[in-house]
Image: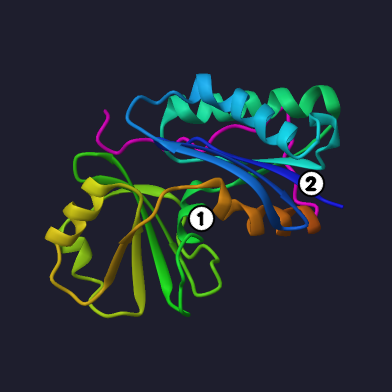
Amino acid sequence: MSLILNIETSSKNCSVSLSIEGNLLSNFDIEEDKYRHSELLTTSIKDILDQNNYSVKDLSAVAVGIGPGSFTGLRIGFSVAKGLCYPHNIKLIGISSLKILANSINQNFRKVISLVKDKGEFFYITKFDKELNETSKPKIEKIDKRFLSQYTDNSYCIVVNSKDSLEYIKSSTDSEIEITRQSISSINMIDLSYKSFQEKRFEDLAYFEPLYIKKPYVY
C-alpha cells in the first residue's frame, strides 16, 4: 500500500493532499496574498491525517513541490516535509512545481508550456511534450511578444498560475495558442508522486534542496 502526503507551497496556494494508491483521500487548498503557509501547513496536515484515521508513521512517502517559486514558501514546505520524514524514516519524493502546474490541465495530446511569474516580464518556464516529459530545463526567461510569436498554433497550450499572468500573456499575443490559468495544487501531484513511488525514485534527505534558479537580471 502507498499512502502519500503531497505538499505544495511554491506559490500563494498552500496545498496539502493525502492519497492512497494514487487516489485522493482528502485535500486542503487555500490561495491568498497573505502567504500564511507557516501557520496553515502543519495544522492542515494534522487535520487531514486525523480525518482519515492515520498518523504520520503510517505514511509511505511525503512528496513536496520543489519549485521554482516563492523562496519562503519553498523553505517552509521543505522544512515540514523533511521534519516528517527524518524521525520516521519516511521516503521523500520531489516534483517540479512547473510539472505539477502542467499536469493540472487536460492536454488533449498537446505540448505544454508552464509559466510562473517571477518579476516584471520574467517568468519561470519549462516546456513539456505530450507525455509530460520535460523538453527544456527550468529557467527564467523574458516572456514578451517576441517570445510568444514562436508559438502561433494550437499544438501548444500555455498554463499560468495567476490572474495577472493570464492577463499579461493574453495581451502579449494574438495567436491561436490556448492560454489557461490553474492553481499549483497538491491534487495534481497525486499521479506523479504515485508513479515516483512505484519506480522507487526517492530523494536523499541530507542533500535535497529546493529548485532555486538564478535570476538573469541580478548582477
- Foreground pick, 37 / 95: 37
The colour style of the image is rainbow
Q: State the residue position of label 2.
A: 3
| Residue 184 in the image, given as x and y percentages of width and height | 45, 47
Is residue 151 left or right of 210 when viewed as pictured? left
**Vertical arrangement, residue 5 with respect to residue 175, above or below:** above
Q: Residues within 10 Å of mark 1 (few under 14, many from 20)?
A: many
Which of the 4 quarters of the picture holds residue 47? top right
Q: State the residue position of label 1.
A: 99
| Residue 209 in the image, given as x and y percentages of width and height | 59, 32
Proximity of marks 1 and 2: CB atoms separated by less than 8 Å: no
Identify the amino acid type marked 1: Lys
Q: Residue at x 44, y 23 (%)?
A: 36
Q: Which residues are magenta?
A: 199-219
The total of numbered circles placed on residues is 2
For residue 25, the mark is: none
Q: Label 1 to label 2, Cα distance in Å?
A: 21 Å
**Vertical arrangement, residue 119 with respect to residue 194, above or below:** above
Q: Residue at x 21, y 77 (%)?
A: 176
What secondary structure do most residues of the magenta stretch adopt?
loop
| Residue 5 in the image, given as x and y percentages of width and height | 69, 41
**Sequence-first disc among 1 and 2:** 2
**Vertical arrangement, residue 116 with respect to residue 180, above or below:** above
Q: Residue at x 48, y 26 (%)?
A: 37
Identify the amino acid type marked 2: Leu
